[in-house]
Amino acid sequence: MEELIRMAEERGIDVEDLIINAIRSRSKDPLESIRLRIELARKFITEARERLNTGDSIQASEKAYKAAEEVVKALAEKFNIPEYQQAIKEGRWYTHQLSSAASKLSRTLGNWVLNGWSSAYLLHVWGFHEAKLSADDIVGYVNEVERMVKEAEKLLTH
């Protein structure tokens, strides 16, 4: 199974997304996939904090990005915005769709969506891919993503 997951990820397939979409399409509970995404976001932000505490800014950055990605997907699904419809149609999310979704959602939900997404994207590029940021450099950005997760949790699970 691990080999299959590795091969899929090497080919740009988001395995978690595939599984969540399969669950959503077969579930009688329309909110199940949203709850799963929020649980994943919590897991990723917890892992980001743990990595940050050990000084691993590269993995902390990527875990925070993954948390924000799940939040944007959950919110987009909840509010059924066009970016969500396009992602379902295409069978995957593209980064530009996530950015557009975050911008659109922030207009109605508040700047916490856009601040969290922007911080996460900066972490993804400069903290993870470019590996140019230290643990001290990323604390504020991780805090913004964590705030995003908490705000989404309040909105989507209560």
Image (cartoon, rainbow, N blue to C red):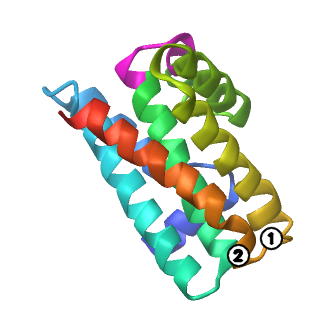
Q: In which quarter of the image is the N terminus?
A: bottom left
Name which residue lies at 63% across and 73% down: 59
Q: Where is residue 139 in the image (x, y as percent from the top left)?
A: 63, 67
Residue 2 within the segment the image draws in magenta: no
Mark 2 highlights which residue? 136
Looking at this view, is 110 or 86 the one in front? 110
The rendered magenta stretch, by its main secondary structure, is classed as helix
Q: Nearer the viewer, mark 2 or mark 1?
A: 2
Whole-number angstrom distance, CA of label 2 to CA of label 1: 8 Å
Name which residue lies at 37% across and 46% down: 150
Q: Magenta stretch? A: 77-85
Label 1 CA crowd tier, 10 Å (few <14, some 14–19, many 20+): some
Q: Where is residue 50 in the image (x, y as percent from the top left)?
A: 47, 79
Name which residue lies at 13% across and 26% down: 28
Three-letter code for the amino acid on which mark 1 is drawn: Leu
From this viewpoint, which residue is outermost toward the left?
A: 28
Mark 1 highlights which residue? 133
Looking at this view, is 121 or 108 the one in front? 108
